Amino acid sequence: MSDELNIEEFDVLLVGAGFNGLYQLYHLRQHGFSVRLIDAGADVGGTWYWNCYPGARVDSNVPNYEYSFEELWRDWNWTERFPSWDELRRYFHYVDEKLNLSQDIEFRTRVTSAQFDPGLDQWHIQTDQGTDYRARYFILCTGFAAKAYVPDIEGLDQFKGECHHTALWPQEGLGFTGKRVGVIGTGASGVQIIQEASKDALHLTVFQRTPILALPMRQTRLDEVTQREMKKDYPEHFRKRREDFGGFFDITPVDKSALEVSAKERQAVYENAWSMGGFHYWVGTFNDVLLNQEANRTAYDFWRDKTRERIDDSALAEKLAPTDPPHPFGTKRPSLEQWYYEVFNQDNVTLIDVREDPIQEITATGIRTSEGDYPLDLLVLATGFDAVTGGITQIDIRGTKGMTIKDKWASGVKDYLGMAASGFPNMFFLYGPLSPAGLCNGPTCAELQGEWIVECLQYLRNRGLTRIEATAPAEDSWARHVSEVASMTLFPQADSWYMGANIPGKTHQFLNYIDVPMFMEQCNQCASNDYEGFELS
């Protein structure tokens, strides 16, 4: 441990320079707290610093995907409805410059451990750069996709070509021209990188386990005139997104069952949502698509038929858009695509269904399956993340009893309001487990949860309180509540990252809270009752 004289001390230490961390830094600083933010990247942006692979772009359309305060949106103009990673980087640079944030950020630094000191009611935090901190409050803004998952495939370390996880892509860039490219995984990053690789690769081999039920993005260009017109409605848009199920301003489902309308009306609703693009077809059709198996099947069948129209080969169509759903439609996060299904009509693209033809090993020159060898120059791991919990549990965080947060959650997550854990006083996490996390538009949740945290810390300061800790009964009750809400839906029927099912050995548990306004109602009720469910001292 460093000499006490070399320890820097702050009211709040934040981890993560994405939407959440920057919101916290700015607003806590505005309210007179001393704050330091630490990030492993070399720049602001959080996930948009790391995800720079070809084709990476956001799946929430603007102005959903930006901060709502006017001092930021007034002079900023986007060029696309769904911005790319490099435009999002430019946006974060703009935010940084406007709010003067970098002066309080330590980049290229990873928090390695944090230990609560009950004598001082402070956290002692250490980093890989040898810097030590003490802070009254420790707030993790690591996001739900901060720990890349690299599967344990035989021979992976023997591959002699280039191999990169999409979330660890070379910052200097890497192209596909003239290369034999293999992509393992067909989730969001897989879809995006497959689209780009198909244009330039000598040959592209896609290794699919479960078909992705991707939706049309309907990308459009935006100019300044269009943006000027859009901004007339921004205040109302930002008000509405705080009241929406998923934190969006522009998705309004029909308040009817898919089963109570005629086939003609059902088709019309589906066609309308399909034409709008984005997540409209996921959560903007009928009110029971994610609740009722029979209603869900009508949505799947429409998706399947629309998708098959774009695939020339019937055998490929069955693999990409099966007759029967691989899981209820929408219970895995849909990816947004632009020309994904047409890719498989190309002569330079091969689809391998690894359920039928499993990967046996990675060789020095490519991938060997049970039925053949596929030579590769570049191997892309689009294998996702240890989502929601991984960004937190990868840090050695120890609370009052010496137990790590990883050990506390080893048999399943329990926390309170998706933001605090018993045994870990003065620690909060945003986009955390048992909060809306992966089911909420990111900037919306950053602001809603962010406001709650800022107000909580002001409450404590104004009353001379130095410690806040979730109680065990409160987190038991919250975990049951989240599970009960999820059980009323079809989400638990899919082996998704929402359930932790993509990580071997991880407890299967629904890790997200469904319905943003209902979540915030619970949080605000807690605050109005003097933070009921927490012990304050």
Image (spheres, rainbow, N blue to C red):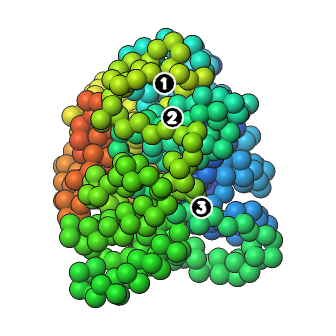
Q: Nearer the viewer, residue 500 or 178?
A: 178
Which numbered circle lies on residue 170? none
Look at label 1 and name its amino acid. Answer: Tyr
Tell me the SS state at disc 3.
loop
- Name the residue beneath numbered marker 2: 205
As rendered, which of 66 and 366 lies closer to the eye? 366
Towards the viewer: 384 or 516 = 384
Taking 85 as reference, is 264 left or right? left
Quarter of the rendering containing residue 12: top right
Q: Which residue is mark 1?
A: 374
Q: Residues within 10 Å of mark 2 (few under 14, many from 20)?
A: many
Residue 426 shown left or right of residue 135 in the figure: left
Residue designated by label 3: 65
- Label whose residue precedes the other's in the sequence (3 or 2): 3
- Picture quadrant of residue 522: bottom left
Residues packed near mark 3 inside 10 Å, few (<14), some (14 to 19) or many (20 plus): many
Please report whichever mark, 2 or 1, sits nearer to the chain's N-terminal start. 2
Please indicate, yes or no, whether residue 497 appears anywhere in the rendered image. yes
Closer to us: mark 3 or mark 2? Answer: 2
